[in-house]
Image (cartoon, helix red, strand yellow):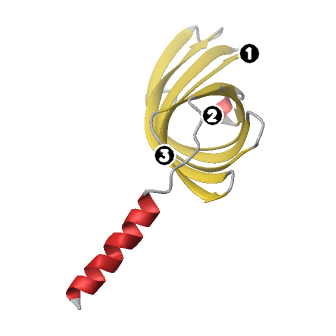
Amino acid sequence: MKKLILSAFTIIGCLVFTNAQNIAENAIGLRLGDSDGLGAEISYQRGLGDNNRLEVDLGWRTGDDFDGFKLAGLYQWIWNIDGGFNWYAGAGGGVGSYDFEAPINDSETFFFAAGNVGIEYDFDIPLLLSLDFRPEIGFGDVNDDLDFDIALGIRYQF
């Protein structure tokens, strides 16, 4: 009986983890969200295997009182739901900086840790649409709290 149960769990586990994905080797586009006040980010994804990838996002903003940038890197795991519809989760971190204008004339650098969970649809054409949620916890004077970022991603795959 124990061998039968162990065999069943082994077969189910193999079926779950051998579900190969069709992840593009590269994808580039925009991630449009809150991003802690930085707005749109340039997003690049690099496939690392059948079901994982690296995502790098760069956001910047120029305003009347400050200039800022934020660079995030995330390692993601992807699971197929049905056809071109996938969900993914990941973890990573990044660095950012704000340069404040008058009356403060100061610059601050901060670091952050981030998680990521989302859904995406891979069209038959080289277009990938995603909606994700990225909680971030910052370490620094200008960004030392928990931030929740929701964004829409539009990427060209090649």
| In the image, residue 70 above or below residue 66 | below
**What is the secondary structure assignment of the residue under circle 1?**
loop
Sequence-first tag of 2 and 3: 2
User: In the picture provided, is 105 more to the left or to the right than 85?
Assistant: left
Do we see residue 138 in this rendering? no
Q: Amino acid at mark 1?
A: Gly
What residue is shown at x 44% (from left), y 56% (from top)? 18
Q: Position of residue 149 (x, y in %)?
A: 63, 42
Looking at the rendered structure, which numbered label has been put on residue 63? 1
Q: Are marks 1 and 2 in contact (CB under 8 Å)?
A: no
- Given residues 127 and 68, the one toward you in this image is 127
Q: Amino acid at mark 3?
A: Asn
Do we see residue 47 in this rendering? yes
| In the image, residue 128 above or below residue 66 | below
User: In the picture provided, is 9 more to the left or to the right than 151?
Assistant: left
Q: Position of residue 6 (x, y in %)?
A: 26, 79
Q: To which residue does mark 3 refer?
A: 51
**What is the secondary structure assignment of the residue under circle 2?**
helix
